[in-house]
Image (cartoon, rainbow, N blue to C red):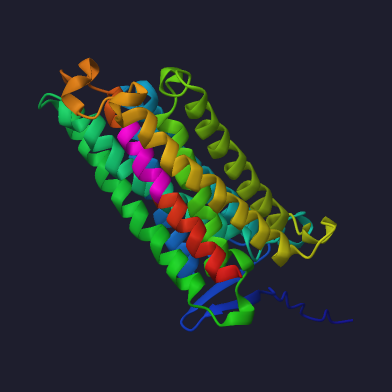
Amino acid sequence: MAGIPATVTHTTFTKSLSPGLDSLIIVASPRALFQPLGLLRLLQLCSTSLAFSPVIYTGAWMGPMGRWCLFSWCFSFAMTVIILAVELAGFQRRLPLSWQNFPITCACYSLLFCLSSSIIYPITYVWFMSHDYIRKYAVCAIIFSSISCVAYATEVTWTHSRPGDSIGYMASMTGMFKVFESFVACIIFLFLNNQHLHMQEPALEWCLAVYIICFILTMVSILLILGKSTKVLPIPFPTFLTGMTFVCVLLYITVIILWPLYNFNEGFHGLPNRIMDSSCSYKRAHSVCVWDRQLAVAFLTGVNLLAYIADFMNSS
């Protein structure tokens, strides 16, 4: 009896993301990497790895600012690896996560992390380096960090421009506000890593408490969305978000008054001028003097207050 030829069919599943941009969800197939979004994520992987590799090789990441930059690049690289691995294996539906929201959330954080590193690293490291091979490696890290910013910004823009019903909540303006607010809080914590900045006065301790409370509230809202757990709340989730944002606005208003008052007013033992701070009288690599840290926190507080106000107006 003659044998019947057998034909093996390879099945692929596609999900439209936006006009001209399709993400192939192919089970155990590397062909997904050669789709536009796959190629973009490969660029993200290469650029972030080429950003942190020379920094690790030369050991040019000492101090809190250097550790922040290294963490930013490694975090972005790791999140992109996880996203690619899950999509290549087709495990999206098996994870207790909202896959409609997880990639865009990681892309937003990675964009902000790489952008901050592209600014902080040259200011705190390259500026103080001698013109040797270590400086060349550091410049390469900055270049690839900037490329990472462009790659992640492209993904965020593509995802945000999709038709309304096909995007996740985190790709909306309210979701992006939440990512931005939590990120700014992280930068504030970075500048507040010296306890002398907030242990001198009870008012400054209150400011630190406000930063922590608002950060936790914002992260809880993000985690509820990513974990598809918004229905566990006793009130509707939009009402929770509006109330939470309003509370954060009120808390940040107190900080925007108290922080500059107790840090830059002589009547409250503050230093109104930078030259009055002895730690700023000489340049030191890998560090930022106290007065500059206080000014950075004051500026970032204003930025986050504006973000919470815009978020509240958008969600109410």
Q: Using the image as rendered, state which of residue 269 and residue 166 is in the foreground.
A: 269
Residue 45 seen anywhere in this rendered image of the structure = no
Question: Which quadrant of the rendered structure holds the C terminus?
Answer: bottom right
Question: Which quadrant of the rendered structure holds the N terminus?
Answer: bottom right
Reply above or below: 56 against 307: above
From the top left corner, tell me how far across and down residue 55 is, in percent: 32, 30
Q: Residue at x 76, y 59 (%)?
A: 228
Q: Quadrant of residue 300?
A: top left
Residue 219 seen anywhere in this rendered image of the structure = yes
**Left or right side of 49 for 214:** right
From the top left corner, tell me how far across and down residue 135 is, in percent: 18, 30
From the top left corner, tell me how far across and down residue 269 is, in percent: 34, 21
Q: Residue at x 35, y 54 (%)?
A: 149
Reply above or below: 291 against 199: below
Reply above or below: 224 against 7: above
Extreme front residue here? 267
* Magenta region: 293-302
Q: Residue at x 43, y 62 (%)?
A: 40
Q: Main secondary structure of the magenta part?
A: helix
Q: What count of labels does the image hold?
A: 0
Q: Residue at x 55, y 45 (%)?
A: 251
Q: Quadrant of residue 192?
A: top left
Extreme left residue here? 131
From the top left corner, tell me how far across and down residue 298 is, in percent: 36, 40
